[in-house]
Image (spheres, rainbow, N blue to C red):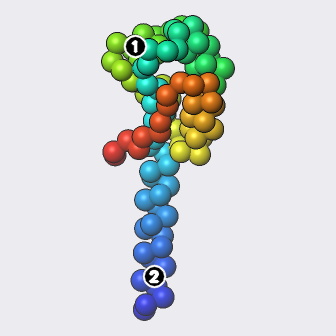
Amino acid sequence: MTITNNHTKLKEDVDVLTQLDEYCTLIVWNDEVNSFDWVIETLVEVCGHSAEQAEQCAIIIDSKGKYAVKEGSYDTLKPMCDAITDRSIGATIEVIAG
């Protein structure tokens, strides 16, 4: 009986981790250093946005201070986040409560 309970607990933990991985956002933060063009170019190259989508994101980032530019699993978003921060643009990954 104990083995079954441990297995069930492990499965529950794995299910929770899987759910969390599917509900993350990549947040880009506003600053006073990077130009609109640099942020737009970064979103196009790193996140695969169209120029229009990247421009809209940049406008929202500028006006609101931050914006969720991409959703996905942590494993998908982490390399994008690293690539954005490597370009000296602030970015973080946040878990969406669901």
Query: What residue is shown with label 1?
Result: 62
User: Which numbered disc covers residue 91?
Assistant: none
Query: What residue is shown with label 2?
Result: 6
Quadrant of the image occupied by residue 77? top right
Q: Is residue 49 above or below residue 5?
A: above
Which one is in front, 34 or 41?
A: 34
Q: Position of residue 5 (x, y in %)?
A: 42, 83
Disc 2 marks a residue whose amino acid type is Asn
Residue at the right extreme, as displayed: 45
Disc 1 marks a residue whose amino acid type is Asp
Of badges 2 and 1, the one in the foreground is 1
Residue at the bottom extreme, as displayed: 1
Q: Can residue 19 be seen in this view?
A: yes
Which one is in front, 4 or 75?
A: 75
Alpha-carbon neighbours of circle 1 within 10 Å: few (<14), some, or many (≥20)? some
Which one is in front, 63 or 8?
A: 63
Q: In this view, does 22 lie to the left or right of 84?
A: left
Q: Where is residue 4 in the image (x, y as percent from the top left)?
A: 46, 85
Q: Position of residue 34 (x, y in %)?
A: 52, 14
